């Protein structure tokens, strides 16, 4: 609740992994799952538009009325320039390999979803266009992303190739799962005032518009922020030993209200439950 109070006041929180562990244990995470969650990124599949990233993703409904998190059927994922996402694949519907049942069954992953729901529930947000803020339910899209850098093979990992951007979300959470051969100055996250120009790279930004800087370096380092109240950027992934490839594994959860007809992505949200990998996770609210 102290973290929730900080989130209400500052509109973002950064929690060190060492502090996240007892919180997640209190929300049901089992000791053996902390080790296994470090390996889930081995299950990621090809990204359809980026050669340096592998991904799995799943859609979930966070429903405070029924106090339950349910897995929803898969559908394309689209972000647009109108949502402050300017990249070569803006506006293109993308499909990724789906979240494996073993990943969503990991109690650490489940506890992270519960943690986020407890932090943001009831927090006022700046509304996005054509989202249904009269609906009690939330749509949560969870990505497990592994970024690769291997200069010898011409692969250079950019956790945010799009530069300064937003993710079409109300609340965004990013969790560090691990890395291999990553240089210590890699993948620094900057929070920018919304006045910053969408699509510019970090070296082109106005320092006066930087609202915060965080660095995911340790297992379970976690950032939660109001996506429509900040833009953000992430610096490149560099190899520590240039003779070996580097990887960086993240869990990213985008949470927003359901889309209304006429949303800029061009389609609405299906609320159908997933038919082959269901999840019904009980949720307690204060």
Image (cartoon, helix red, strand yellow):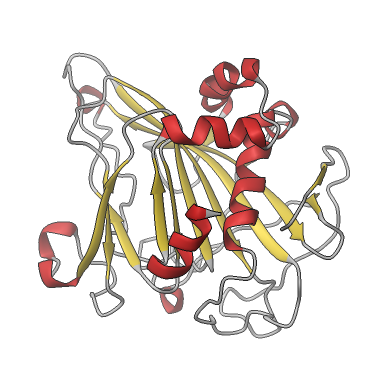
Locate residue 217, reporting x and y percent. 31, 32
For residue 110, above or below residue 123? above
Tally the numbered discs.
Answer: 0
Percent of width and height locating residue 142: 60, 47
Q: Nearer the viewer, residue 221 or 8?
A: 8
- Residue at image x 64%, y 15%? 32
Residue projecting furthest to the front: 2
Q: Is residue 256 left or right of residue 249?
A: right
Seen at 57% across and 21% down, the residue is 34
In the rendered image, residue 250, in percent from the top left (x then y), is placed at: 45, 37
Quadrant in which the N terminus appears: bottom right
Q: Residue at x 38, y 49 (%)?
A: 14
- Along the viewing direction, whichever of 7 and 277 lies nearer the viewer: 7
Q: Is residue 244 visible to the viewer in this orientation of the structure?
A: yes
Q: In which quadrant of the rendered image does the C terminus lie?
A: bottom right
- The image quarter containing residue 61 is bottom right
| Picture coordinates of residue 157, whole percent (x, y) | 29, 38
Q: Is residue 232 above or below residue 244?
A: below
Query: Looking at the image, which is closer to me, 225 or 238?
Result: 225
Residue 98 appears anywhere in the view? no
């Amino acid at each position: 609740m102290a973290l929730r109070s900080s989130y209400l006041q500052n509109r973002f929180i950064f929690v060190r992994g060492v502090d996240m562990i007892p919180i997640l244990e209190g929300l049901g995470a089992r000791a053996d799952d902390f080790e296994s969650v470090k390996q889930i990124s081995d299950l990621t599949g090809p990204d359809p538009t980026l050669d340096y990233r592998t991904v799995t993703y799943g859609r979930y409904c966070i429903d405070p009325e029924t106090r339950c998190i349910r897995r929803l059927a898969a559908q394309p994922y689209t972000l647009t320039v109108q949502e402050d996402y300017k990249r070569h694949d803006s506006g293109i519907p993308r499909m990724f390999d789906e979240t494996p049942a073993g990943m969503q069954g990991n109690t650490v992953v489940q506890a992270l979803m519960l943690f986020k729901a407890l932090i943001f529930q009831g927090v006022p947000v700046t509304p996005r266009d054509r989202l249904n803020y009269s609906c009690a339910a939330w749509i949560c899209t969870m990505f497990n992303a592994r970024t690769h850098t291997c200069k010898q093979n011409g692969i250079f990992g950019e956790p945010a190739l799009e530069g300064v951007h937003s993710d079409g979300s109300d609340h965004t959470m990013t969790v560090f799962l691990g890395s291999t051969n990553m240089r210590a100055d890699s993948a620094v996250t900057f929070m920018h005032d919304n006045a910053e120009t969408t699509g510019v790279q970090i070296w082109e930004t106005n320092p006066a518009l930087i609202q915060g800087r965080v660095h995911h370096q340790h297992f379970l380092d976690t950032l939660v922020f109001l996506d429509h109240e900040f833009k953000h950027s992430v610096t490149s992934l560099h190899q520590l030993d240039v003779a070996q490839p580097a990887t960086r594994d993240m869990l990213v959860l985008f949470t927003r209200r359901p889309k209304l007809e006429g949303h800029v992505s061009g389609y609405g949200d299906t609320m159908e439950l997933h038919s082959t990998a269901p999840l019904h996770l009980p949720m307690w609210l204060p």
